[in-house]
Amino acid sequence: FYPGEGANASTACVPCSPGHACNATGLAMPNEVVEAGYFARVYASSATPAYGSKTDVTCSAASWERCDYGPCPAGYACPAGTGDPVLCAAGRYAPNTSSVECDVCPGRRRCPGGVVEGARTDQTYPCFEGHWCPEGTGVLPPKCPPGRYGGAGWGEQSASDEGFSC
């Protein structure tokens, strides 16, 4: 698009803004917001773009980091108008592509998010032995209190205390 009047060459045009799509020629401004579940850093021509890049031919679903636009990758969230995918925080995960928001980590599991090096944000991990993992557990779940114990993956819900116990 070209935000002014009277451009004398196509090189005067600027890339479509992050989170937006320019789906026609002759635009003075981007004419679409990228839909939820997608991202667009620059150059998007659709509000629901497939993976693509104007400059990197190695862009693909497996190497989405090299892409200018595409479906939101697993482990990230992309609300409407996303320029760069948002990494899931500790206690949350996104197991599928095109996620609009990250899911809360289920009970009996932990989701360290992007906090722990090597931890993936598209999957959950078992609770540590000797700990309990209520819904939304992130990096370090609480230890079992005295008089109780827990095996790996424990986090049973107890009707008596409305929480999770060892």
Image (cartoon, grey):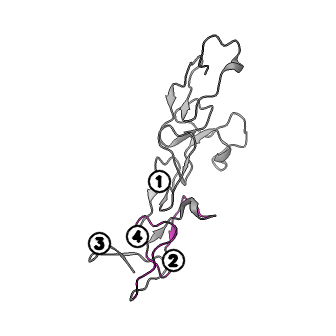
How far apart, in angstroms, are the residues tagged by discs 1 and 2?
22 Å
**Image quadrant assignment for residue 122:** bottom right
Q: Residues within 10 Å of mark 4 (few under 14, many from 20)?
A: many
Compare marks 1 and 2 and give the one earlier in the sequence.
Answer: 1
Mark 2 lies on a secondary structure that is loop
Contact (CB < 8 A) between labels 4 and 1? no
Q: Amino acid at mark 4?
A: Pro
Q: Which residue is mark 1?
A: 102
Q: Which residue is mark 2?
A: 128
How far apart, in angstroms, are the residues tagged by discs 4 and 2?
12 Å
Extent of the magenta region: 118-146
How far apart, in angstroms, are the residues tagged by discs 4 and 1?
17 Å
Please tell me whether residue 153 belongs to the stretch shown in magenta: no
**Image quadrant assignment for residue 106:** bottom left
Q: Residues within 10 Å of mark 1 (few under 14, many from 20)?
A: many
Q: Which residue is mark 3?
A: 162
How far apart, in angstroms, are the residues tagged by discs 1 and 3?
25 Å
Compare marks 3 and 2 and give the one earlier in the sequence.
Answer: 2
